[in-house]
Amino acid sequence: MKAFFDELKHAREASGMSLNDIADSTLINVKYLAALEEGDTSILPQTYIRAFLREYATAVGLDPAVVMKKYDGALAASAPAPGTEPGTDAGGASRPAGINQSAVSGGSVFFRRRGFIVAAIVVVTAVALWNIVGRQQPPPIQEIPFQAIVKENEQHLAPVPLPAASTSPIEGPQGKVDSLLLRATMTDSVWVQMIIDAQEPREYLFRPGARASWKARDRFTVTLGNAGAVQFTLNQKSLGTLGRNGQVVRNVELSHQALSTH
């Protein structure tokens, strides 16, 4: 993977473009671009990483299809072999660090023969499992163009008008009243996952300066890809940010208790 991302960086430098130039043309935050060049792909879900890579490739004059083919090849090459884990032998047993394998192999003929038989059984079993599991191809990752992501999330943020004379809380499922109002103001690009009460999670990608609001009956569960880029208020009480710039925070619960602790 390092060789792949180094190649991207060299292509950008050869084109004479800076990270800020690419950020201006693609609307991708320069922090995410820098993280991609360093190979830090943990900042966003896989669908967004692929979208960012395609935009990056186009900006520096590379063929996006070729870049994505190399990326998939690098991913496959860096994946661990099926059925094995670091620090284990072929049979899955732990192997203490620092043991000289040649010293272990110097045992009696009996143990060597028994080890050969066990190894043969392991190999046959591994081949059978590979024939079964290896044929099950994972579903392809859906690629989403970056501009489509932005457009989709702008639609999520479209305000829902309420009747002009109504100032009462909105009733949720089964007539229960939503008692929490969470507002967010973005100072930088940020990925947000929001879970309202026990509903399915929703994901958003916001630009700097965007605003959003959500209503809940009991709680919000928030995950952020750039925690310092969002200022929150809960029921008009300022909560500030949930972390530092560039920090990933996961499953932070905001409820009535947050009102009493801030």
Image: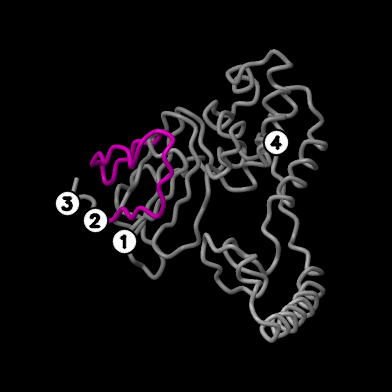
Which of the two labelled residues, at mark 1 and mark 2, occupies the earlier sequence position?
1
Residue 256 numbered mark, or none: 2
Label 3 to label 2: alpha-carbon separation:
7 Å
Q: Are marks 3 and 2 in contact (CB under 8 Å)?
A: yes
How many numbered discs sit on the rendered protein?
Answer: 4
SS at badge 4: helix
Is 201 covered by the magenta stretch?
no
Instruction: Give the residue type that dot 3 points to.
Output: Ser
Q: Are marks 1 and 2 in contact (CB under 8 Å)?
A: yes
> Which one is in front in this view, the residue at disc 3 or the one at disc 4?
4
Three-letter residue code for mark 1: Asp
Residue at image x 70%, y 61%?
Answer: 81
Instruction: Say which of 197 and 52 sits in front.
Output: 52
Magenta range is 229-255
* Whether residue 251 is situated above or below residue 3 in the rendered picture: below
Q: Which residue is mark 3?
A: 260
Name the residue located 33 percent from the left edge and 44 percent from the top edge: 165
Q: Amino acid at mark 4?
A: Ala
Residue under circle 1? Answer: 218
Q: Estimate the x, y position of residue 144 in percent, counting from the top left.
A: 69, 43
State whether residue 80 is above or below residue 89.
above
State which mark lies toward you, 1 or 3.
3
The residue mark sitting in front, 2 or 4, is 4
Above or below, 230 against 112 in this view is above
Disc 4 and disc 1 in contact, CB within 8 angstroms: no
Q: Residue at x 42, y 65 (%)?
A: 198
Mark 4: few/some/many CA within 10 Å (<14, 14-19, 20+): few
Q: Which residue is mark 4?
A: 3
